Image (cartoon, grey):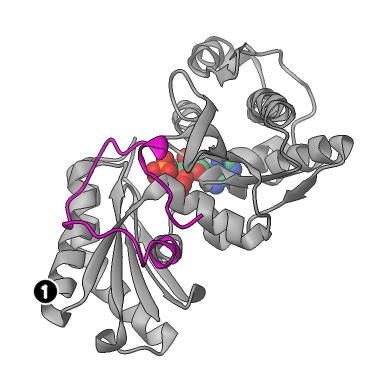
Amino acid sequence: MYVLGIESTAHTFGVGIVEDGEVLSNERDVYKPASGGIIPREAALHHYTLGPSILKAALKRAGVGIKEIDLFAFARGPGILSCLKTGAQMAAFLSAKYGREVVGVNHCIAHIEIARKCSGFADPLMLYVSGGNTQIITFQNGRYVVFGETQDIGIGNLLDKVGRRLGIPFPAGPKIEEYAKAGKHYIKMPYSIKGMDVSFSGIETFISRVQNEHRIEDVCFSLQETVFSMLIEASERAMAYCKKDSMIIAGGVAANTRLNEMGKMMCGERGSSFARIPMEYAGDNGAMIAYTGYLMRDYDRQLPQPKPNFRTDAEVIKYR
Ligand code: ATP
Ligand code: FE2
């Protein structure tokens, strides 16, 4: 069975194809604003303009004809409405033209499912860290339950905002990681865990006050050490509480080596397993939508309509 998945929730337009759940292709292009953050209208125009060529590239790479596709999956949300619409429209068009059904996938759950597939873990604790989302997730009673999350901005947004202050273009995560490797001096930053939740906004304010007094390498190093420690501490507590013996990190920030190192260290000390997700599947991509659509193949069909505020715990998981 061939499933084609379309990702368009924010900056990335991606198309992936899976055959019986195995990835055949995963093509994408990322919209990069000239300066500042994402401009929704521009991002949507990027998706609308490049979408067809990315679709063609994914089919070519997979060696599959469009008429052979059995099911079209698209990311329903959460995300930016104008961006979501481009993916939904493509799914609706393909469905009508080729007479195949459409399945709407929760973007956050797709990050989780591709990470779970890559790790081989049946029931891990999941730390989902991306631009807009920072959630500690466990599977309970047929849903992905958010055990802890950010009380304000997502960790990726924090990295991107701080990056903008430091003159690093969007997305800033990879460059901050590079600078952090050359950091030598730790600057004490606000460390905020409230119960199982974390809070990041104080850190940006703090950095705005001290950034001129320190080397950029030390600011980036201290930023990473502080925010990743908060996340790993909260994750460790969640693992103990929920009695999970494995952990995965999903989402765009999962591309970060230092965060993975800390996760691995924490799991090692507890005698638990840890897996790092391949870079290709860390950030937004079409393969994760296709794979999750494949998992949902026997259950859910929706009208191809976006759902911008689609929460992780809103979906009842029928395939697990
Ligand atoms: P979501 O809709 O799930 O919130 P997203 O639209 O933010 O996703 P992703 O591709 O999942 O998209 O994540 C992008 C984020 O990942 C950006 O904020 C970027 O700075 C961050 N990022 C990418 N690479 C790294 C890295 N090496 N280290 C830290 N952060 C990174
Ligand atoms: Fe994402």
Residue topped by disc 1: 96
Quarter in which the N terminus is drawn? bottom left
Q: Toward which corner of the image does residue 253 lie, by quadrant?
A: top right
Residue 163 locus on image (x, y percent): 50, 32
Residue 130 locus on image (x, y percent): 49, 40
| Residue depicted at x 44% and y 63% | 295
| Residue depicted at x 31% and y 72% | 54
Of 169 and 294, which appears nearest the observer? 294
The magenta segment is 291-320
Q: How many marks?
A: 1
Residue 161 locus on image (x, y percent): 44, 28
From what the image shows, is residue 28 above or below residue 61?
Answer: above
Of 200 and 65, which appears nearest the observer? 65
State the SS at label 1.
Answer: helix
From what the image shows, is residue 71 above or below residue 43?
Answer: below
* Mark 1 neighbour density, 10 Å: few (under 14) some (14–19) many (20 or more): few
Residue 78 locus on image (x, y percent): 32, 41
- Residue 251 in the figure: left or right of residue 86: right
| Residue depicted at x 81% and y 43% | 272
